[in-house]
Image (spheres, grey):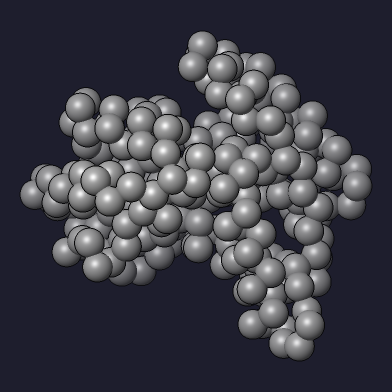
């Protein structure tokens, strides 16, 4: 198996789920006591969250690029960003490393396209929902249109992620609120909804929603394992 470099800590709840899924997937594919060969750089999310809030994406990119160079120097053969939002700075990271970055949009786009989805709702941080990196890549590579909640819905989704899910809190009232937002996206023509934040799968699943949900974490992990196993 090839070594994966995981850029994590954004939040550590998300990274813990990546670690669990990567190792479980490696064991399922290889059997026995096999686990995933990983190198992990886990950042202090508070510092990056302040930069994001200030709109200083340049410094966010520089810090993550330094971490990525360290993973490459340590022997990582590909990079996995264990977060959706930080894919906004993938160009800055890619400019500083020679190894591939396994982009989270691509396996999700492939799965949506295979399911015949042409219009998908997107839930995530307000950065993920409002910045172009998800919307543009999905449209350009897969011909899929993205629809997001209205301003109040985006604010609620973002608040729950940062004030609850990133802290490991799963509140029934937030689950109901998210399910209502998914229903509104379906009424806007979304044939499916992308769980575009790695923590959202902690909160809602298929039992709460009438449209299919595409978990970007699970799809990203499967893609990373394909690389690790040379598939």
163 left or right of 220 in image: left
Which quadrant does the C terminus fall into? bottom right
Please identify the quarter of the rendering in which residue 134 is found. Answer: top left
**Residue found at the very far right of the displayed protein:** 74
Q: Is residue 93 visible?
A: yes
Q: Quadrant of residue 21?
A: bottom right
> Residue 6 in the image: x percent, y percent?
71, 49
Task: Give the residue drawn at x 50%, y 40%.
Answer: 166
- Camera sees residue 230: no
| Of residues 171 and 219, the one drawn nearer to the viewer in this rendering | 171
Residue 155 position in % (x across, y down)? 29, 28
Q: Count the numbered circles shown.
A: 0
- Front-most of residues 127 and 144: 127
How far across and how far down the image is residue 154, in percent? Answer: 27, 31
Where the N terminus falls, by quadrant?
bottom right
Instruction: Give x and y (percent) for residue 197.
Output: 44, 45
Is 210 on the left or on the right of 45, as rendered? left
Residue at horizontal 56 percent and vertical 17 percent from the top: 50
Which of the 4 image quadrants contains residue 208? bottom left
User: In the rendered view, does 4 fall on the left or right side of 186?
Assistant: right
Residue ID at (28%, 51%): 172
Residue 195 to residue 110: above or below: above
């Amino acid at each position: 198996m090839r070594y994966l470099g995981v850029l994590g800590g954004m939040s550590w709840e998300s990274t813990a789920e990546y670690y669990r899924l990567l190792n479980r997937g490696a064991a399922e594919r290889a059997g026995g006591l096999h686990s995933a060969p990983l190198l992990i750089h886990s950042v202090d999310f508070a510092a990056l969250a302040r930069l994001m809030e200030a709109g200083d994406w340049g410094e966010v990119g520089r810090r993550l690029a330094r971490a990525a160079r360290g993973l490459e120097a340590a022997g990582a053969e590909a990079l996995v960003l264990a977060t959706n939002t930080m894919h906004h700075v993938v160009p800055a990271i890619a400019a500083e490393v020679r190894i591939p970055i396994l982009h989270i949009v691509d396996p999700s786009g492939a799965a949506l396209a295979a399911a015949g989805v042409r219009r998908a709702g997107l839930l995530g941080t307000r950065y993920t929902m409002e910045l172009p990196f998800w919307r543009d890549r999905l449209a350009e590579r897969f011909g899929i249109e993205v629809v997001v909640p209205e301003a109040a819905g985006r604010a609620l989704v973002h608040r729950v992620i940062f004030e609850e899910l990133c802290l490991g809190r799963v509140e029934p009232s937030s689950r109901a609120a998210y399910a209502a937002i998914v229903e509104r996206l379906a009424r806007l023509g979304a044939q499916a909804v992308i769980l575009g934040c790695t923590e959202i799968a902690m909160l809602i699943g298929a039992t709460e929603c009438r449209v299919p949900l595409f978990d970007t974490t699970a799809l990203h992990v499967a893609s990373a394992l394909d690389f690790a196993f040379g598939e």
